[in-house]
Amino acid sequence: MRPFRQMRTARRTLAVLVCVAGVALALTSLAGAHVVVGVGENNTQLFGDPRFLALGIGQVRDDIPWNAVNVPRERAALTGWLDDAHALGLRPLVTFDHVIGSVKEERKLPSVAQFSKAFLKLRHLFPWVTQFETWDEANFYLEGTAFSPKRAAQYYLALRRDCPRCTILAADLLDVPRTEAVPMVTWVHEFIHFARRQPAYWGLNNYFGANRFQTSTTRALLHAVAGKIWFAETGGIVKRVNATHVNFAQGARHAAAVDRFILRKLVKLSPRIQRVYLYEWKAVSRHDTWDSAVISWNNSVRPAYDVIASTLASWGIKPDCAISLVPPACAGYVGPTGTSGPTGTSGPTLTGS
């Protein structure tokens, strides 16, 4: 539930890091019965951060305007992001969203033909990308889809038709109160009615329930749909400043406790919960109006990082300490040459910034 789209940075040089791609995917597969953990981040700096690469996370998510391939600036940013992810062997989940503009422009929905044409162009440019989410926060009042689950269902069916072998998430739901969005259960029932089927996959942005340490909103979606659920965007809130009436607790320690709750309790509600994409990796500045980042704006490691790294290690996904010594499991690591190995760009660990 981001109030703005962060500016994307220029691509980083990845040549020396490509060798970790196979390691990341192999480590991710060791999760076995556990959920798959990914990171949502629109910024390419994620791919050059040894602290991320050491964790063995193989899934990443990008949220883009539905017409990104038709807008030169957006297309360039998307190309850079996907090329960097591909170079490291990471699997992206691409989520479609409104265009960037005025409120009126953002609420205006494309025709099904326009949506399909843009998608087919994206598929032509990036045929290796096979995971897509029909629309971001589709029940949120600021999205045109909130009042048109029929159109959202038509987009979903078009994606399935245009890429039958792709994994298509029906829509991404926001679990906030009815003052901010159409209730999830009401919206998905309408969607299913118009789609005339039970989709195999759904997305959920459960910031509301997670940051209150509640399971009720996630349970509500589990009861309303028959398909698998991916937490497409979630995480503990460090800072949130905007005009909505939904209030969250804040702070780096709070965010770490929330991430622990997500990874060790919420995901255990049902075997149909298969993935968790934690948003976001690094804060841009101390003035961000939305901050749920694992790495602070000043480049220091927040407590949430230790929660994620320790949870993955407990699942058998051990960090690659030769890449970075920052994960807790790398304490005392001695490299093959007898040295302690690289630490990455960690800086001091802070708890409140």
Image: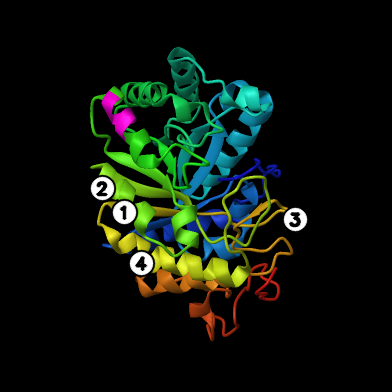
At label 3, which amino acid type do we have? Ser
Under tag 2, what secondary structure? helix
Name the disc covering residue 82, or none.
Answer: none
Mark 4, residue position: 265
Q: Residue at x 27, y 41 (%)?
A: 225
N-terminal of the two: label 4 or label 1? 1
Q: Residues within 10 Å of mark 4 (few under 14, many from 20)?
A: some
Mark 3, residue position: 285
Quarter containing the N terminus:
top right
N-terminal of the two: label 4 or label 2? 2
At label 1, which amino acid type do we have? Arg
Q: Are marks 2 and 3 in contact (CB under 8 Å)?
A: no
Q: Residue at x 42, y 41 (%)?
A: 173
Label 4, label 1: how many angstroms apart (C-alpha)?
A: 12 Å
Does residue 237 lie above or below 168 as drawn?
Answer: below
Viewer-nearest of discs 4 and 1: 1
Label 2, label 3: how many angstroms apart (C-alpha)?
A: 39 Å
At label 4, which amino acid type do we have? Lys
Viewer-nearest of discs 2 and 3: 2
Under tag 3, what secondary structure? loop
Q: Are marks 1 and 2 in contact (CB under 8 Å)?
A: yes
Range covered by the magenta-colored residues: 189-193
Q: Are marks 3 and 1 in contact (CB under 8 Å)?
A: no
Magenta stretch: includes residue 299 = no
Label 3, label 4: how many angstroms apart (C-alpha)?
A: 31 Å
